[in-house]
Every structure is written in structure tokens, then in C-alpha cells.
Image (cartoon, coloured by chain):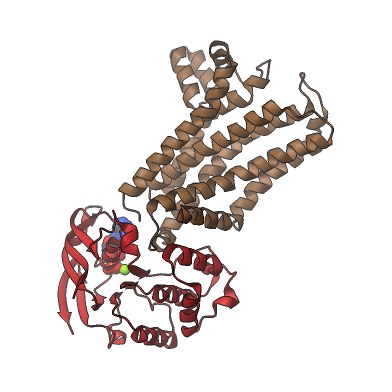
Amino acid sequence: MSVIVDISSATKSFMGVKVLDSIDLKISSGERIAMLGPNGAGKTTLARSILGFYHLESGSITVAGHDPIRERVAVLEKVAFIPQLPPPVKLTLDELLDFVQKSSGVARNRIESFARKMELDIDAHANKPFFKLSGGMKQKMLIAIALARRSALFIFDEPTASLDPKARKLFYDLLSSLDYDYSAIYITHRLEELEGLINRKIYMELGRVVSDEKI
Amino acid sequence: MGNLLLIAYLDIKESLRSKWFYVYTFVFGGLMGLFFISGITDSVVMGFTGLSRLLLIFMQVTIVILPIFILITTVKSISADRESNILEYMLSFPISLRDYYWGKFLGRFATVFLPVMMALIIGIAWGLYKGGEIPWGMVTLYSLLIFSICTVFLGISFFISTLVKSHDIALGLSFTVWIVLLAFIDVALIGLMMQNRVSDQLIITLAMLNPLETFRIGAITLFDPELTVIGPVAYYLLDTLGHGFLMLYAILYPVVLGALFTLLGYTLFRKKDIL
Ligand SMILES: Nc1ncnc2c1ncn2[C@@H]1O[C@H](COP(=O)(O)OP(=O)(O)O)[C@@H](O)[C@H]1O
Ligand SMILES: [Mg+2]
């Protein structure tokens, strides 16, 4: 199995506090990880570091052999991300789809088809600014975009926070129906819901990985 | 290049829907309207045709409101994008930082430059309709000056936005920059001069480094033979440096300064944490 994410002694501080404290972590392709831990453990910071938003103080991260900062385009071609809270993007759905399609080479009808499976009708809202959608609709849209990208790695930061139980189920069903060998990091507080979707469980605390087990 | 233009295009579309853009366009368009109503175009004062007079006044107002408009709206929108995690999401797609930064710059440039130019063009059209002579030299110079002033203040805005992450500090800093530059146009410089404690050389240097002052010199000095509104520093500069050089300097210096700040901002954007 090839390694998709390779993190070695990654350290990052904010205002003198180590938020990532010498993290070592290898994720092989096909591994689907539940990333758990209390608020402030550094989960989001780790996700953002993999996405190339932060410069590490020491240590290194590679994604499919690429450096997330120096080769950000190569890395982000492989990764699809859903943030913790849907951002109030001011683009209309139409424009957002345009952006995703042109920047990531995803066909629009693929996104629309995933949206339909999430019970979101894009056409009905195509000219509405994204931020005017309800919380659940925004999240569905972000999910549809992420899944349509058919990425080697998904990084989902509490993707179901604003979904009702039915939509959550739709989302998990969709994930199970993906027909290729993707890797995933689910940052979550609801481990029980991910059952059947994950094969590894990582627990973070104070910037360190305190437990890591395959299941 | 494709992604750069895509970012610029989407930024423009977004701006066209935003409130600040309407206020901005309305202010400059309304200004011209006000000038028409007040009959400035009909009068001939100090040997100016009505249209030249109108353009002159337009530029005097522009220098006060354009910079603060550009600074506040640009800094506000960039830091709001960062704080609300829009930036995080948009940059999680395979877009290079180069395309994103310069695309945003290009889009912003279009949205701040075009409304002011439109107002200028409306003014000219009105002048034509009134049967006046178009002062083409003046129109060309003013277009170039507006281009320069947009460049320098957008450059400063982008620099501040990448330097400072906090929304409040960034806004405060923009305001400070504007106040300081405004304070150091002729009025304050004359004050310094009269105190006689600083050398003339320093005053001249301060004047030449201040893009607001060079804009005023370029826009007004060269057309006001009496130099009634501009003050002794500009007069001195005109006397020692000459028309041609001053004009060129007033156009090029802000562009160079703006390019410098924009590049510095780009370097910070790449070298520092994005979020
Ligand atoms: N950009 C930032 N600047 C300063 N401090 C930050 C920043 N991002 C996160 N932190 C701090 O780092 C710690 C870990 O945050 P985070 O990674 O979001 O935790 P988690 O996602 O596990 O709840 C928190 O104490 C948070 O306040
Ligand atoms: Mg978090």
C-alpha cells in the first residue's frame, strides 16, 4: 500500500503554544481515519497543515510525495476538503460551480448528480449567493463538490455538524457507495456514526497523537 | 493564466453585487451630477473653460475620497474573507497562490478604477453636449493619474491585508496611513516650513514621497497658473523641476510605489501562514 500522507515530527506553535507537538503520522491509501480529540487538540491545525495553509516550525509533511506549500497545486489536486463550518461564500451557486469546474476539472453534472443524491436541487438555487442558503443546504453543497472531485484523499472537518439525521445518513450512504480506493480523515465527535466507514482511529490531545489503532 | 482570470472575473462579479460598490459608484457618479447641476461647466473662471474647471474640481474631490474608499473596502473584504474562512475554502482547490493573489488584484483594480473613469467620461460627454472644447491633454493626464492613484492605494491595501491578520488592526492601519498622507500635503508642510526647524530639503522630499501630494501636484499645479490652491511647496517644485518632469513623476511614482507594495504583499502571502 502506498503512503498518501507522510507527516514526520511536524511542529507548529501559535503565540508560543505548541499546537502540533512533533506529530508523526503515515496514512496509506485506502485508510479511512476517524480523528478524535477535545476542542483545541490541534485537529483543524493538522488538517490545515496538510492543505498547505501553515508553515511548520520543524518537521515535514508530504502528500503523495509533494510538499503542500511548495507544490500546493499538485497536493490540492489530490485532496478534497470540507471545512468545519460552511464559509459565507458570496459567489452564487452557479459561479461556485464554475470555479470548482475550472480550477479542479470536475464536470458540473457530476456535482449536480451528487447534489441530487444529497437531496439538494442546485438548479432551483443556481443564482442565489451561497451564503444565503440554509446551513444544511450549504453543507450538502460542499459535500457534493467534495465527492464529485473523486479525490485520493478526503479531509472532512466535522462535515455533518449542520445536517439533520436524514441528511447525515444520505451522506454516509454516499460515502459507502464510492467505488474506488480513497483515503479519508474524518475529524469528528460522533464516532458511532462513522462505524463501517472507518478502519483506523486516531485520538489527539494537546497537539499530540495519544492513541492510534486500526480497526 | 486561466485561473488568474477566473479569480479576477469572479471577484468582479462579486463586487458588482456588493453594497460598497454601489455606494462607491453612486458617490462618483453623483459628484459629477452635482457639478452639472451647480453650473460649474457654464462658468469661465481664471481663463478656464467650464469643462477644464469641472475636471479640476473633480480631481480635487477624488484625491480626498478615492484613497480612503480603496483602502477601507479592499482591506475589509480581504480580512473578512480570511476571518470567515472563505479564503480557507477557496484555497483548498488546486489554485496557485500566484493566480489567486494577482487575480484578486486585477479584479479589485477593475472595480475601483472603472467607476471613477466612468464618471470622468460622463463629465466629458456632458461637456461635449454643451458644445465645449475637450481639453484632451488634461483628460489624458487625469486618466493616467487616476490609474496611478488606484495602483498605489490598492498596493498599500494588499500589503496591509497580508501583513496584518486581524481585521480591526488592518482597518486601523489603513486609516492611519490615509490620515498621515493627508496631513502631509501642503497644509502641514507649510506649517513645518514656518516653524523653520526643518530644512527645506526635507520638506521637498516629504512632498515628493507622498503619493497624495504628487497627485495634487500633477492634477492641479500644472493647470492653475496662479497656484492659489496648492501652496508654496508645489510652487517650488514646479520652479525647480519643470512641468515635464513633474508630470511624468506624478504619473510614474505612484505606479512604482504601488507595484512595490503589491509585490511585497505577494511575498508575505507566500512566505507567511495563509490563515
Ligand atoms: N490561526 C491561529 N492563530 C492562533 N491560534 C490558533 C490558530 N488556529 C488555531 N489556534 C489555536 O490552536 C489550538 C488548536 O486549535 P484547533 O487546531 O482548531 O483545534 P481543534 O480543531 O482540535 O479543536 C487552539 O488553542 C486554537 O486557539
Ligand atoms: Mg477544529
Viewer-nearest residue: B237 or A68? A68
In the rendered picture of this protein, how many numbered marks are placed on residues? Answer: 0
Vertical order, B57 against A76 (above or below): above
Left or right of B180 on screen, residue A70 = left
In this orientation, does residue B14 appear?
yes
Left or right of B227 on screen, residue B150 = left
Asked where in the image residue A142 lies, by quadrant, the reply is bottom left
Q: Residue at x 19, y 66 (%)?
A: A6
Q: Position of residue B74 (x, y in %)?
A: 50, 48
Q: Quadrant of the C terminus of chain B?
A: bottom left
In this orientation, does residue A53 appear?
no
Q: Residue at x 59, y 77 (%)?
A: A124
Viewer-nearest residue: B117 or A64? A64
Of the four image quadrants, the one with ligand 2 is: bottom left
Q: Position of residue A161 (x, y in %)?
A: 39, 77
Supply the letter of whichever chain is red.
Answer: A
Q: Position of residue B242 (x, y in %)?
A: 57, 14
Viewer-nearest residue: A18 or B116? B116
Q: Residue at x 79, y 28 (%)?
A: B133
Question: Chain B's colour?
Answer: brown
Q: Residue at x 51, y 43 (%)?
A: B71
Left or right of B274 on screen, residue B17 = right
Asked where in the image residue B126 lies, by quadrant, the reply is top right
Viewer-nearest residue: B183 or B136? B136
